[in-house]
Image: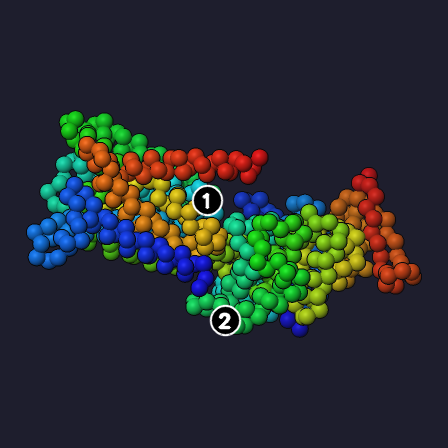
Amino acid sequence: MNAGLRTNLALALGIAFAAALSIAAGKVWLPWSAWTFGDPRWLIIAELRVPRTVLAIVVGAALGLSGAAMQGYLRNPLADPGLFGISSGAALGATLSLYFGYQSSPFVLPSFALAGAALSMFTLALLAGRSGSLILFALAGMILASITSSLTTLTISLASTPLAASEIITWLMGALTDRSWDDVSMTLPVVIVGAVLLAFTARSLDALTLGEQAARSMGVDQRRLQWLIVLGVGLCVGGSVAASGMIGFVGLMVPHIVRPLVGGKPSAILLPSALGGALLVLLADSLVRIAPTVSEVRLGIAMSMLGGPFFLVMLMRLRRSLA
Amino acid sequence: MSALRVEQLCVSLRGRPVIHDFTTHFARGRVTALLGPNGAGKTTLLNCLAGLQRPDSGCVRIDEVDVQSIDRRSRARRIGLLPQQGEVHWDIDVATLVSLGRFPHRGRWGASAEDHQAVLRAMAATDVSQFAARSARALSGGERSRVLLARVLAGEPEWLLADEPLASLDPAHQLDVLDRLREVAARGAGVIVVLHDLGHAARVADDVVLMREGRIVAQGPRHTVMEAPELRETFGIDVQIFNVHSGGDVVNGERFVVPLRRSR
C-alpha cells in the first residue's frame, strides 16, 4: 500500500470517528443509545447535528482542497484561498444581504454570498487578463481582497442599527451553529462542481512544479488552467463562505500537514487535503461545542486561534532553513 | 530528412522588436549551437521554435507544418524544451520529476509500461538512476541539471531545445551534459542548444548559428562559422583560433577558440 492510499484511508477513518463525535457533542450530549429512530432525541440528531456535521465535512473539504490547489498553482506554500479575494467577495455579498435585512428566506444570504464570490471571480479573471501570468494573478487577488474587505467594513459602519452591525460582525466570524438541511442542499452541489473542476487541474499543477515555461512546453494550457482554478476555487470557497461565514487558515494549514505524509507532488496532496480539511473543521466544530465556555466560541475565531500559532511556527522553521 | 525551418521570423516583446527577419533551418541528427551576446534573442528564438511565443510575422515549420497550428499535446511530444532556470518548486523525488517528462504522452488513467520504460531509459542515459529516490531539491547543481535533462529526454522528443544547459556547472559536468546532447543527436533527434562557451561550441556543435540583436550574423558548419571576423562582429571581441593537427586526444582538424579582449 503506498503512502498516499494509507494517508487517505487513515484520514477517512478519522472523519468517521470525528463525525460520530460531532453528532454526539453539544449542549445536549447524545449517547449511542439516543441514535435510534424512536428516541425523542432523534429530532436533534436528524435536524441539527447531522446537517451540521455534513456541512462541517463539506466546508472543510472545500477549503482544504482549494488551499492545496492554490498552493500548487501559485507554487507557494504560504498561499491561501483568502488571497484570491474570493472569500472576502462572498463575505461582502452576505454582509450586504444582512445590511438590507433580506432574511425572509434561508436562501437569500447564501445566494448573495455566492453572487459576491462570482463577481469577485470574474473581476479577478478580468484583472489577471489573458496572459495567464501568475504574478499578475496573485497581485490582482490581493488588490481585490483589500477592496472587498474595505467595502465590507464600510457596510458595517453604515448599518442602520447597532443590532444590524453586530449581526454582520457575528456572521463574519464564521460558524456552523444552527445550520439546517437547507444550507446543506445549497452548499453541497456548488462545492461538488468546484471540486470536480479542481480535480481536472491535478496534472497541470504537477507540470507547474518545473516552472511556467517548462509547463507550457509540456503542453499545459495556462489559460484553461487559470479558468479551472478561478472557477473551482470560487465555487468551493464561495459555497463554504455562504454556509459558514469566514473560516480562515484551513486552506493554509492542511496542505502543510499532509505534504510530508504523501510527498510534495501537487496532484498527490489534493485528496488528502480535502479529507484533512474535513477532519480539521469537524474536530474544531466539535471542540467549540465541548469547550466549557459560557457561549459557544465561534468556529472562525477558534480556527484563527489555531492557525495563528501554526503560521508562526512555520515562519520560525522557514527562518531557520534560510539562516 | 525531417527539418525545423524558420522563415522570415519577426518577433517583438512588449512592443520592442527582438527578432528581425530571421530565416534558417535545423537538421535532425545534428547539434546546432546558438551563440550570441546577452539580449541577442536566443531564448525568444527557442520559445518560438517550441511554439510558446507567437511571432508577429513569419513562421516556424516542423516538417512543413506551422508549429503554431499543431495542438499543444502533439507539439509537446515532438519538441522538448529545457529552460534556462532549473526551477523545482516542490520537494519531489528524482523519479517523479523525470516522469513529468511523460506529461504529453500520458493518458488520463496514469502511466503506461511504455512511459515507465522511457523514464528508466532517460535516467540511465543521464546517469541519475542511482538517486531515483532522493529529493530533487537536495541534489548538487550538477546532479540537478542532469535530472532536469533526463526529464526532457523522458519525453523522447524529435527536437531537443536546451537554453544554456551548462550555466553554473563545473567543467566535468559541462562535458557530461555535452556528451549527453551529442548522444541524443546521434540517436536521430535534432539538438538546438544555446551556449556561451565558444570553446565548447567550436568542439561539440555540428552547426553554429551566430546571432546579434535578433539577426543572423553567420550560420553553417562550425569550422566555416567559428572564424575571427564573424566572432568579432557577433560579440565585439578578438579571438585567437588554434587549429590542431595532431597530438593527444584531440581529433585532427579540431579547433580551439580563445577569447582575448574586446575589439577596438
Observer-nearest residue: A85 or B264? A85
Chain of the residue under the numbered disc 2 shown in the image: B
Q: Tell me which residue sits at (33%, 57%) in the image.
A: A12
For the residue marked with disc 2, what is the amino acid?
Ser
Residue drawn where x is 26% and y is 43% of the image: A285
Residue ID for mark 2:
B112
Left or right: A242 as drawn, with respect to B152: left
Q: Secondary structure at mark 1?
A: loop
Callouts 2 and 1 in the same chain: no
Residue name at image x 43 percent, y 58 percent: A4
Type of amino acid at the residue the image marks with label 1:
Pro
Q: Is residue A25 visible?
A: yes
**How is the structure coloured here?**
rainbow
Rendered location of residue A155, percent (x, y): 23, 31
Q: Which residue is mark 1?
A: A77
Density class for disc 2 (Cα within 10 Å; few <14, some 14-19, many ≥20) is few
